[in-house]
Image (cartoon, helix red, strand yellow):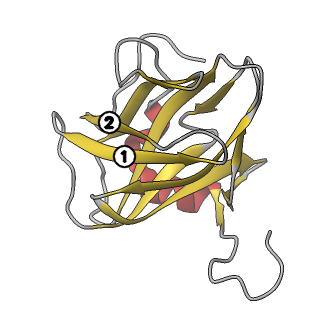
């Protein structure tokens, strides 16, 4: 949690609230090569990206895997998208999800954003993405230049064939 007069406070949502907002997203998991993009910038590769079709007119979730093949760690600091007024990063801690200001990507490791775990929330949707569309998402890092991916919108009940 940031101290001082931060414009964005840490939000806590109960699992029941998260389930109500995400609806059928609980059936989703983290995928592999059957979905998403695979950009590669300075040792970072993004794959398994997808957004289940939102069940809400104002919110959607997003999942992906960032693999770091480099010898130094990096940090996902911000995510932006033309489809949402705000994209927040969330960590799942026990029975709640908390907004995170940063997510670490370890050297020779990966950051996994998946249903039931750490994930992205697209808030204040400007339009409701539909299955079969792609949503442009820009990932901002502490060290690496931003990476833009096209995140496919899958069915609300999409469950990747393989998971983490």
Q: Position of residue 156 (x, y in %)?
A: 31, 38
Q: Is residue 5 above or below residue 27?
A: below
Q: Nearer the viewer, residue 134 or 15?
A: 134
- Judged from this view, the residue extending furthest toward the right is 3
Alpha-carbon neighbours of circle 2 within 10 Å: few (<14), some, or many (≥20)?
Answer: many
Q: Are marks 2 and 1 in contact (CB under 8 Å)?
A: yes
Q: Position of residue 5 (x, y in %)?
A: 74, 88
Q: Is residue 112 left or right of residue 57?
A: right
Please identify the quarter of the rendering in which residue 149 is found. top left
Q: Is residue 34 left or right of residue 106?
A: left
Q: Is residue 131 left or right of residue 90?
A: left
Q: Residue at x 61, y 18 (%)?
A: 164
Sequence-first tag of 2 and 1: 1
Label 2 vs label 1, nearer the camera:
1
Q: Is residue 136 above or below residue 106?
A: below
Q: Identify the residue under disc 1.
A: 137
Label 2, label 1: how many angstroms apart (C-alpha)? Answer: 7 Å
Q: Residue at x 44, y 31 (%)?
A: 28
Determine the secondary structure under disc 1.
Answer: strand
Q: Identify the residue under disc 2.
A: 151
């Amino acid at each position: 949690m940031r101290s001082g007069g931060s414009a964005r406070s840490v939000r806590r949502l109960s699992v029941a609230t998260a389930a109500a907002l995400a609806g059928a997203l609980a059936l989703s998991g983290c995928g592999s090569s059957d979905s998403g993009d695979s950009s590669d910038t300075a040792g970072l590769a993004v794959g398994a990206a997808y957004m289940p079709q939102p069940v809400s007119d104002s919110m959607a979730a997003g999942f992906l895997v960032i693999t770091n093949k480099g010898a130094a760690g990096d940090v996902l600091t911000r995510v932006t998208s033309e489809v949402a007024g705000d994209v927040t990063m969330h960590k799942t801690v026990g029975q709640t999800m908390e907004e995170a200001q940063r997510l670490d990507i370890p050297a020779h490791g990966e950051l996994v954003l998946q249903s039931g775990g750490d994930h992205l929330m697209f808030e204040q949707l400007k339009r409701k993405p539909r299955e079969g569309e792609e949503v442009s998402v820009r990932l901002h890092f502490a060290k690496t230049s931003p990476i833009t991916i096209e995140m496919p919108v899958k069915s609300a009940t999409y469950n990747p064939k393989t998971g983490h």
